[in-house]
Image (tube, rainbow, N blue to C red):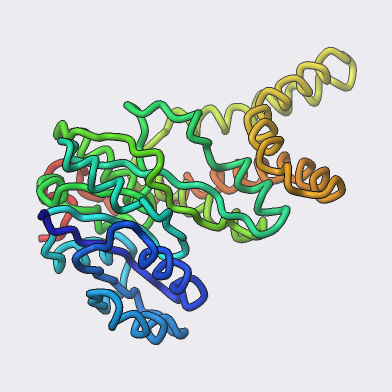
Amino acid sequence: MVRVSLCLTVLNEEETVDALFRSLLAGTRLPDEVIVADGGSRDGTLRRLAAYADRLPLTVLSVPGPISVGRNAAIRRARGEIIAVTDAGVRLAPEWLAALVAAIDQGADVAAGFFLPDPRTTFEVAMGATVLPEPGEIDPPRFLPSSRSIAFRRQVWEQVGGYPEWLDYCEDLIFDLCYRSIGARQQWVPHAVAHFRPRSSLGAFWLQYYRYARGDGKAGLFAHRHAIRYATYLGLLPLLLLAGRRWRPAWCALALAALAYLRTPFRRYARQSRHLRPGPRVAGLLLIPLIRLTGDLAKMTGYPVGVLWRWRQRPPAWCTGSGNLPA
């Protein structure tokens, strides 16, 4: 049987480790080894990990630095031909690992799992509906999986040079683009689900999306998307607001544009909030425009910071084999 290694990184995850490892132990297939790269936890994470050493073939590494460095260190230590990758802070579906491995056994080089929100509050329901796609929205050939739910042949990681260690965020997106550039065969596995809790406050969400956009800027990604966002908020929106003072149809145009922009989150929320009482459900609906606005402002702030870093640091080109790893 092909050996399967599960690799993940942790940093101050004392409160989430148990949920992850309990779900892993409840799975229909266990990994042959679990390699955890700890980025320098100062809470009880290492103590909680040690509690599973007699139930799982567990190795814990001390790897200070960005998540990309931790991922590569864990994979480098792993001995499996198939590498499964997830994150702390998730809860894995029982069939998660078995489904990913089955896709590779059937000929895929990469098994792209999925992820779903695991909200605890009304705010988190609204957050998940605003920022996370549903399975029916995915175009499998174009899907770029998160490294909270993915498996791949070890040789794929070797061919693309691993995760880019010069990048602190968006490292899994670059990894996806790199294995696509070498023609790796990807299979989408929607039932290999990692459940994770959305950000629980606007401040935490703003920081998350600021870092994502800064990563886009550092990697030179999605310039056209960011340009459209700047044009909308700094150009079109002010023009419509000025025109609305004398020309009422401008207000109608602005309202229709906002509804179109929020249509998908509203539709998701209508399905995902059915368990809420009427009062909280309405409150969550009103949060969606605020969440979307916060995310857009965070991206507009973070992207130029990343671009400036790129101009100054001149990072290596990615998708050039060993160029992702330091010499």
**102 relative to 46 in the view: left or right:** left
- Residue located at (16% from left, 56% from top): 325
**Where on the picture, by quarter, is residue 8?**
bottom left
- Whether residue 311 is visible to the viewer of this picture, yes or no, is no
Q: In which quadrant is the N terminus drawn?
A: bottom left
**160 relative to 85 in the view: left or right:** left
**Where on the picture, by quarter, is residue 52?**
bottom left
Give coordinates of residue 310: x percent, y percent. 34, 48
**Where on the picture, by quarter, is residue 221?**
top left
- Residue located at (71% from left, 22% from top): 257
**119 relative to 43 in the view: left or right:** right
- Whether residue 68 is visible to the viewer of this picture, yes or no, is yes
Residue placed furthest toward the front: 28
Q: Please tell me whether residue 260 is drawn above or below residue 66 in the rendered image.
A: above
Viewer-proximal residue, 27 or 185? 27
Give coordinates of residue 21: x percent, y percent. 39, 70
Give coordinates of residue 270: x percent, y percent. 71, 35
- Residue located at (33% from left, 35% from top): 188
Q: In which quadrant is the C terminus drawn?
A: bottom left
Viewer-proximal residue, 27 or 144? 27
**How many labels sit on residues?**
0
Viewer-proximal residue, 325 or 120? 120
Give coordinates of residue 204: x percent, y percent. 60, 60
**246 relative to 55 in the view: left or right:** right
- Residue located at (20% from left, 43% from top): 317
